[in-house]
Amino acid sequence: MGIYARQNIVFARGEGSWLIAENGDRYLDFGSGVAVNALGHAHPRLVAALQAQAEKLWHTSNLYRVEGQETVAEKLTRLTFAERVFFCNSGAEACEGAIKIARRYHYVSGRPERLRIITFRGAFHGRTLTTLAAAGNERYLEGYGPEAEGFDHLDFDDFDGIEGAITPETAAIMLEPIQGEGGVRVFSAEQLQAVRELCDRHGLLLVLDEVQTGVGRTGKLFAHEWAGIVPDVMAIAKGFGGGFPTAAVLATAEAAKGMTPGTHGSTFGGNPLAMAVASTVLDVVSEPGFLEDVRAKALHMKQGLEGLKDQHAEVVEDIRGVGLLMGLKLRSHVLPSQVTKAAADERLLVVGAGDNTVRVLPPLNASDKEITQAVQALSRALTRVALEMP
Ligand code: PLP
């Protein structure tokens, strides 16, 4: 179906931070399949894990215990606030699951009227009907019939409006610590702490969508750690599978208390192939020194991007983001697609986003040399864009 405005490039294979097109052209992949290939392409440990599992067992369904799920759940609960984990297959499904868990929590607590969720405009939680309603982006909802009920939207800048939006029907506050698709818009540590405090005071669940920010992307295993808070429920996907489609919802035991046999499910969720890869991703990302390295690389990249802002002030308005989730906010007369196209002409892949922003999302294990190369390619691309300007 014609739903993607694709660039006319076909990639034949990947090696680390590089994608090699059918015609042999080598591209530096600083889009990582939209924050998915956290360890780059064809990481030897991920390949080995997938191959070994492929020879043993692919699928059994959730009618039986799945060893890989128990292993990954043990790792996730050891590494995070979570005490319960549900496995699914995509970010949207994880966000949908998180919404269901939040409503169900109040339902089994004797407060079934608490089903509304406060969300922020500019968020992206996926393309199912309910996750679209959660984000409330009218462009994505158009033509899809009645909008799922139960979401109260605040503007990103209307953070102070949260308390006023809480009603006796509010179940939860749901947000991305950094809006990725929305243009790398960062909630501050103070804002996240304030929202945690509000949730505690009003008996609400804090639901974080860390589909894009999670699994090391910001230099912490999860972005909320920067604020020193924990959520009650969290959706993860993207980098969690390092390129193998998998996702999860993490929760405290209390928040997940309504999730009893038969209340939710997924045929493919936590499939043995996915679990073999996700388990290895978690091993690599949680190795001593890995996240310190991400933070050092992030600093290097940020310095490079700040330099670009100074050199190309006619194109770039601002640099923002945390860790290796960075955005170039462009001047209003420049389109993200102009920059992504010019970058691709320089054999660099970056990704457009909302709020007139281009995202730079390298693999977490990109080398310093590759980061320098990417900044240089981006500089040439911005020069091209400036030359095209009227
Ligand atoms: N949540 C966030 C923060 C995302 O960035 C995305 C995808 O970009 C999603 C949810 C939806 O994930 P998926 O496309 O895997 O359904």
Image (spheres, rainbow, N blue to C red):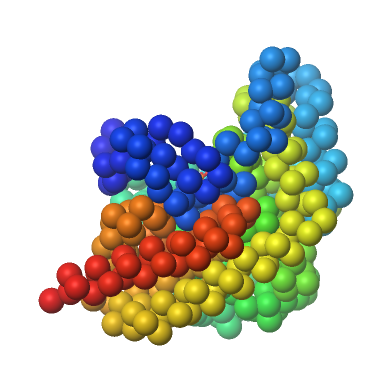
Q: Quadrant of residue 69?
A: top right
In which quadrant of the rendered view does residue 246 lie? top right
- Give the image quarter of residue 40: top right
On the question of residue 239 being in view, the answer is no
Relative vertical location of residue 47 with respect to residue 152 in this rendering, above or below: above
Camera-nearest residue between 314 and 327: 314
Dividing the image into 4 quarters, which one contains the N terminus?
top left
Q: Residue at x 61, y 73 (%)?
A: 299
The x and y percentages for residue 138 are 35, 58
Q: Between 303 and 180, which is closer to the camera in this rendering?
A: 303
Residue at 34% x, 80% y is 312
Q: What residue appears at the point 55 percent right and 61 percent down from the top-left corner?
A: 369
Nearer-the-camera pick, 126 or 161: 126
Where is residue 15? Give x, y as percent: 53, 40
Residue 29 left/right relative to 224: left
Q: Is residue 386 visible?
A: yes
